Image (spheres, rainbow, N blue to C red):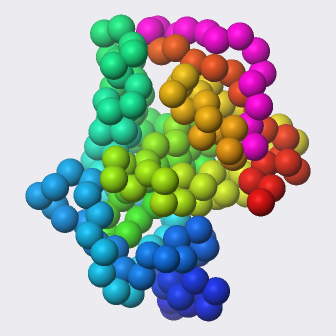
Amino acid sequence: MIKLCLRTRLVCAPGAFCVGALRWLRRASYHPDVSFKPIFMEDTPMAVRRLRATDLEQASAVCMASFMEAVAPSLSPLGIETFTGIVSMNGFADRMSDDNDMFVFETAGRVVGVAELMGGQHVATLFVAPGWQGQGVGRALMTALLECARGEVVTVRASLSSVPAYERFGFRIAGEVGEYLGLVYQPMECVIAEGLAD
């Protein structure tokens, strides 16, 4: 059964979250020859849904493309190697059996966003493909993560370049900048009642 969100006119698959943030986007497809470049069409379904094993290659590619563009230039080779292992197909597959909530944003059969909440309280990944950023994909994924939160506070170790985005989602700085195996991060936290307040 497919449901239609009347407010946004977006078609969502059963069990998926309808994405109100993309009201203006009527149809979107994915051009396979141009990396992560959206092509707008009419009435293409878009949804946030659970990550499936069949999504692993696309999920890994989205994370790597976004990371290489925005984060990797500021990191050491060790940090890039560490991140590559975390978002590899095997890395995702290993974590699917853990106590994690993992989501993708899908449009026209293509994954353009990935998010993961560990143990109901820590955002482990939130990446949107280049070309899709600033269009509400990250907000839709964050909404799905916060709906799965267990407890009053959700934390994240944000890359330094992503701090402003997390602040827009309601996160606040919660400590000094740190480093783990070459990955430089800013600890942040969100009190659930305050997150995504708009």
Whether residue 52 is visible to the viewer of this picture, yes or no, is yes
Q: Is residue 63 above or below residue 156?
A: below
Task: Depth check: give the residue in front, 179 or 151.
Answer: 179
Task: Locate residue 99 relative to residue 133 in the image: left or right.
Answer: right
Query: In the image, is residue 2 above or below residue 67?
Result: below
Query: At 31% from the left edge and 30% from the top edge, which residue is drawn?
Result: 68
- Most common SS among magenta residues: loop
Q: Position of residue 110 (x, y in %)?
A: 31, 64
Residue in the image at 80% along x and 56% along y? 197
Instruction: Work out whether 187 lies above or below 2.
Output: above
Q: From the viewer's perspective, tell me whether residue 192 is left or right of residue 184.
A: right
Towards the viewer: 8 or 86: 8
Q: Residue at x 39, y 15 (%)?
A: 74
Q: Please give the name of the residue rendered at 30% of the width and 81% of the height, measured from the top-left corner.
A: 41
Image coordinates for residue 105, horizontal then vertical, percent: 46, 61
Q: Which residues are magenta?
A: 170-182
User: Would residue 99 be seen by someone viewing this image from the given angle?
Assistant: no
The image shows residue 124 at horizontal and vertical percentages of 57, 34
